[in-house]
Amino acid sequence: MTSRTRAAAPLAVALALALAPTAPAAAGAAGDGPGVTVPAGPLRVGQRVLVDLDGWPAGTAQAEVCGNAARRGALDCATGDATHAQVPPSGRARLPVLLAAPPVACPCVLRVRTPTGTAGATAALPLAGVDAPPAAPGVPAALTLESVHADDRSGPRSWFGLPGELALGFTLRNPGTEDVTDPPFTLLVGPPGRARTIVAAPAVGTVAAGATRDYRVTVPTGAAPYGRYEIDGRIEVPGRPVAFTVEAARRPWGLPVAAAVLTAALLLARRGRRAPAR
C-alpha cells in the first residue's frame, strides 16, 4: 500500500461517517420493557411513517401523536386519529402511523400504549407544521367515585350459608389533566363495622385524564348466617385518597327451609310409629 493510499483511508472513513443517516429516535429497549422506534426527522403533520414496536405484550397497541410531551395524558394527544394495530406473540410489529396534528403545541412525542394502559412507551417526535396553542396549566391528578354497589352472587351456595362471593362494582372518574396509573388499592370485607378480612384487590390500571372507568370485582366471603356484609375500599391517590363503604345482604333461606322439612319428616315418622301401637 502506498503512502497516498494510507493517507486516503482515514479520509474515506470520516466521509462515510459524515454521510451516514441519522439514527431513528427510540424509547425503551427489549430488555427494559416495551419500546417504540420512530424514523429520524424532520417529519411533518400529515405524513405517514413506519413505527417499530419491540418487547410488547401480544394484543392491541394504540399509537397517537401528542404535544406538550404528553404531560397531561389524553388531553395532549390526537386520540381521535390514533392508529391501532395487533402485536403478535413475538412482541415485535411494524405499523404505519399517520402523524396527525396534536391539540397542543410541541414538544411532541409518539405515545404507544395498550388499551388497558398496562404497557406503554413514548418516543420524541421531531414534528413540524404544528400550529396548536400551548397547553394550559395542568390540574393535579385526582380520582372521584362516581358510583358503587355490591350484590350477592353466591348462587345456590348462599341458600345454605356456604362460603360465597359478592360482586362489587364501582366507577372512577379522573377530573384532572394527568393520567392516574396503578394507585395502591386495598379492600376489606366482614360484618358491618367489623370489616377486617383483607381481600386481594385488582390493579386499578390507568384512568386517563378526563376519563371514567368501570370496575367489577369478585369479593369472596366466608360461611354466613342471615345478615349483611360490608366492603371497605380505599384507593391511595396522592393528596386525595378515595374511600368507600358498601353493604350487601346474604339470605341463606335454604337453612330454615331444610330445618322445617327435617322437622316435618321427624314428626311424620313419629306418628307413623305410634299408629300401629294404637
Image: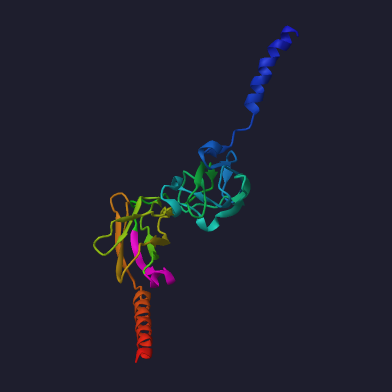
Furthest residue toward top:
3
Q: Is residue 63 above or below residue 7?
A: below
For the point 70% across and 11% down, the residue is 6
Q: Is residue 104 left or right of residue 17?
A: left
In-image side of 106 versus 83 (left or right): left
Give the quadrant of residue 157.
bottom left
Q: Can residue 214 be seen?
A: no
From the viewer's perspective, tell me whether residue 228 is left or right of residue 92: left
Residue 40 on the magenta segment: no
Picture coordinates of residue 34, whole percent (x, y):
53, 43
From this view, report whether residue 230 is shown above or below residue 137.
Answer: below
| Residue 245 coordinates in the image, percent (x, y) | 29, 63
- State which region is magenta: 144-160
- Residue found at the very far right of the displayed protein: 1
Image spot of residue 183 (x, y percent): 37, 50
Asked if residue 159 lies in the magenta stretch, the reply is yes
Taking the spot 58% from the left edge, 54% from the top edge, the residue there is 84
| Scheme of colours in the image | rainbow
- Residue lying furthest bottom in this view? 278
Which residue is situated farthest in the front direction here?
A: 277
Quadrant housing residue 8: top right
Front-lying residue, 154 or 134: 154
Locate the N terminus and report the quarter of the image it occupies: top right
Q: Is residue 40 visible?
A: yes
Give the quarter of the image for residue 224. Answer: bottom left
Query: How many tags in the picture?
Result: 0
Quarter of the image containing the C terminus? bottom left
Residue 115: percent from left, percent from top = 51, 55
Residue at (58% x, 50% y) in the render: 58
